[in-house]
Image (cartoon, grey):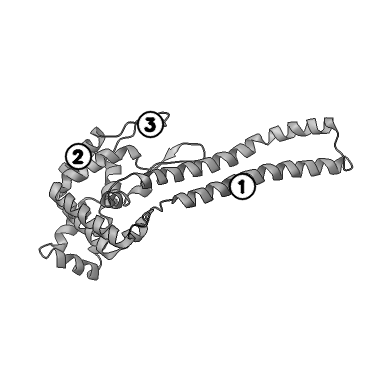
Amino acid sequence: MKQPQFVSPDLTREKNHARSRAMAEAVISAFAATLKSEARKKGGFLTLPDIEDLDVAFQEKISELTKVFEHSFNDAAREQEDLKWQQIKRPAFDRLMVKRFADHFMVKDAEGVPHGTFSRRILPGFFLALNMLMGPDAMEEFHGRCDAIMGRVMKGIVPVDWDLLDHNDDMNDVILDAQLAMLWQFSDTKKRADWFIKLVNANLAPAHEGAAQVEVYWELDHRSFLILINGLLSDLKQVVHEPQAWKRLKRRHPDINQAEIFEILERLS
């Protein structure tokens, strides 16, 4: 599963500068090219009436330039959404769990229309469901292990490199242990899936002012639930097919049964 690339503040500033420069160059280039073309037609000189005629021509280019600007602004808005999520002070464990389905979050296209599987309104209900599935003791353990690993790997460096953490073997062990604990809760697949969907929808965050209708009326359904749960369990799905990774997991959980895990994963597919 492809993992999303979160945007650092420095990279955001660089991209915004590059976009602004590209927009400025587009305007200047269009302006200069038209001036040169008209000046050549007039023997190298432009009169005031000529310039007034050119103003009309430039007005006709507004639509074309508007598309360039809209594309740039939408790119910037999408990156700001990623940056906003990066800056929210959620624990490392919470972030890494969300990272497994974050590439399905809605983003706006060039026309400003959101496209994607999940509205970010899902997050409060998702975290509530996660806590209820795991239980307070297990959640405290997972948080503690993740925080300790993050401190050891990052050594206080900010912003946190979530991709680096996600590729750490010890962190992968924590995520797999959490996915295994979650999987057992879905032994009765239909009952637990219905419970999860209802709980999330009952705790959706309010839509922000000016949100598109697709986000305002968005709710988790069975199709999007399957995308979410398969993202959440993606590491475990790989491990059951990889002998070495399975041995590592079984050393920590000697009583697990590979066939039983595979069967539940299949019902959630």
In the displayed image of the protein, which residue is found farthest to the right?
43
Check the picture and name the quadrant holding the N terminus. Answer: bottom left
In the displayed image of the protein, which residue is found farthest to the front?
156
User: How would you rate the neighbour count of disc 2 (Cα within 10 Å): few for under 14, some for 14-19, many for 20 or more?
Assistant: few
Residue that numbered label 1 is attached to = 21
Residue that numbered label 2 is attached to = 194
Q: Residue shown at 26%/48% (left/top)?
A: 229
Amino acid at pointer 3: His
Q: Residue shown at 26%/60% (left/top)?
A: 149
**Is residue 219 visible to the viewer in this orientation of the structure?**
yes
Q: In the image, is 113 to the left or to the right of 234? A: right
Where residue 124 appears, x then y in whole percent?
27, 38
Q: Secondary structure at mark 1?
A: helix
Residue that numbered label 3 is attached to = 208
**Is residue 175 visible to the viewer in this orientation of the structure?**
no
Mark 3 → mark 2, Cα distance in angstroms: 27 Å
First in sequence: mark 1 or mark 3? 1
8 shown above or below 205: below
Where residue 154 appears, x then y in whole percent?
33, 60
Q: Are marks 1 and 3 in contact (CB under 8 Å)?
A: no
